[in-house]
Amino acid sequence: MRTPPPADAQAAALQALAARLGPAHLRHRLALESADETQVLRKGPLLQFLEHRVARPALLHALLRLVGLRERARRNTLRIELREHDVALQRLPPAFEGVRLLHLSDLHLDVGGGFMAALVERVRGVAHDLCVITGDFRFRTHGPWQPAMEALASLRPHLAPDTFAVLGNHDSIRMLPSIEALGVRVLMNEAACVGRGGQALWIAGIDDPHYFRAHALHKAADAIPDGACALLLSHAPEPYLEAAHCGFDLMLCGHTHGGQLCLPGGIPVMTCSSAPRALARGPWRHGAMRGYTSVGCGSSLLDVRLNCRPEVTVHRLVRRDVGSARC
């Protein structure tokens, strides 16, 4: 296992982040990451409470074992589906017609148990032009993050050269330099321009809006020219209203795991999100903005899934006819 970087290297990396993101943003993030969980934990959905407690997963595993579902639920985490989704965007530049966007979310890469082999096998050979990752690289919300970076290094060769990401509520801001060292651009309330055939598509990304609440949509949106086609990466769907008001054409997110432990028919018991349940999985729309919430590649809290298989998604970007409504 790779050892953590020396203290002076960590200090230099944090100093560079402060210059890039602003010292207040960095202080906010680091303070919540290092504070005692009982002091910083907000009141919210049960799953948000449970994922900060080590003992509860053992109880849930015991319950699943008692009802005879534990092994089936664990096998489901390795049965990763490939889903294909066409997204019609009226403002999409003609040069980007048919571009395939590979969307990965909630990877939780260091879970173990053969998951990384299953994920690499699922992604290997999937044709795509761009890749986006909507957060949660680490399995737990605290502790070492280097194993997740080791796993990401094994996945990176199978992703497009142009790969963009945002951090989730399981991720430490200290991961950012290691992620970017692998050639993945992490967008922290920032926007990037992708060129193709002399035309541009904008991809913006915000810091985690769910637990850290460090997102600043206006900062990301202000860099985008008026009238440009723009995609937003957000770990969670909560800021969908703000995103629509900012004029984004498409919002891609995750975090909910689609419920992860669902009733028959894929009905989630919990979504761990304050957004409407209609935004908990799959495609959705708010006003002129389209959206898609991935059920995620990995698993959180415990490595099981019921009635909600993990996914990797390929979004194919297309344009509507000239006379059709926006988005």
Image (cartoon, grey):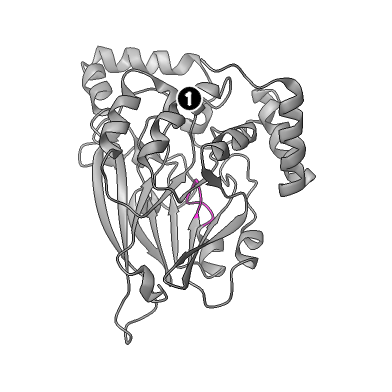
Q: Residue extending furthest bottom?
A: 323
- Point out the stretch of residues depicted in magenta: 233-239
- 24 vs 191, left or right, is right
Q: Which is nearer the eye, 187 or 25?
A: 187
Residue 123: percent from the left, percent from the top? Answer: 30, 39
Image quarter hosting the C terminus:
bottom left
Q: Quadrant of residue 169?
A: top right
Q: Amino acid at mark 1?
A: Glu
* Residue under pointer 1: 150
Q: Residue at x 32, y 83 (%)?
A: 324
Crowding at dot 1, Cα within 10 Å, few <14 / some 14-19 / many 20+, comes out as some
Q: Residue at x 56, y 24 (%)?
A: 145
Quarter of the view holding residue 73: top left
The residue located at (48%, 14%) in the rendering is 55
Q: Is residue 235 magenta?
A: yes
Position of residue 271 measured from the top left corner of the image (x, y, whole percent): 41, 41
Q: Is residue 104 left or right of residue 202?
A: left
Residue shown at the point (58%, 51%) measured from the top left: 206
* Residue 308, visible in the rendered structure: no
Provide the major secondary structure of the magenta segment: loop
Residue 321 visible (yes or no): yes
Q: Position of residue 130 (x, y in %)?
A: 40, 53
- Residue lying at the far front of the rendered structure: 197
Q: Does residue 166 show up magenta in the picture?
A: no
Vertical position of residue 70 compared to residue 91: above or below: above
Q: Is residue 98 above or below residue 280?
A: below
Give the mark count. Answer: 1
